Amino acid sequence: MPNMVSVGISDHKVSVNHDDILITYSLGSCLGVTVYDSQNNIGGLIHCLLPLAKVDPEKARNKPEMFVETGLPLLLKKMFELGARKNNLIIKAAGCGAPLQSAKSMKVGERNFVVFRKILWKNGLLLKGRDIGGTKPRTMLLDMKTGETLIKSQGSEYKI
């Protein structure tokens, strides 16, 4: 039976357990990222709230996962420490939408995705799948047994 491992907002989890399913809920303007090393069965999931740490450097030090700029490098570092290899990584992203009128005016989702893409580019990493933008909330799962990333939203379920 699978072990559901919940990842909250401004949080991340890394796993090497085949029975784990990493899951995060309510991705609106937030960015959810799964990273999976298919050769070494190492996976991670992060749920970032904001793009840049400069808005609150103290929070960035205490909770780096809150920001795409500091959270994604932290997730990658933890995976590499467990033995993940850069050329094996399968990276997928979801969220970055504009679920609320106020989010549309601030474009938090768009900015989250721009910062995410810059980090990938700077590190020579490729995005293999995505479900980005729009107004719908999403739940994102990483199945450690298969390495598949699943999205659940408004009654539908699909792989990215």
Image (cartoon, rainbow, N blue to C red):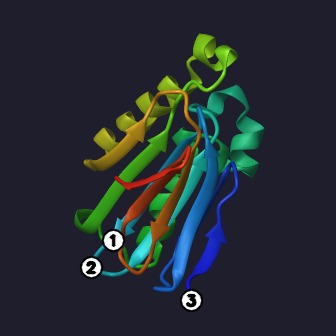
Residue sitting nearer the eye, 147 or 87: 147
Q: Give the CA separation, mark 1 to mark 3.
A: 22 Å
Q: Earlier in the sequence, mark 2 or mark 3?
A: 3
Residue 144 image-quadrant placement = bottom left
Residue sitting nearer the eye, 17 or 40: 17
Disc 1 target residue: 37
Secondary structure at numbered mark 2: loop
Where residue 84 appears, as percent x and y from the top left, is: 36, 73
Residue 59 image-quadrant placement = top right
Give the residue type that dot 3 points to.
Met
Residue at point 61% right, 10% down?
105
- The image shows residue 5, relative to residue 90, as above or below, that is below
Residue sitting nearer the eye, 123 or 68: 68
Q: Which mark is residue 1?
A: 3
Give the residue type that dot 2 points to.
Gln
Secondary structure at numbered mark 1: strand
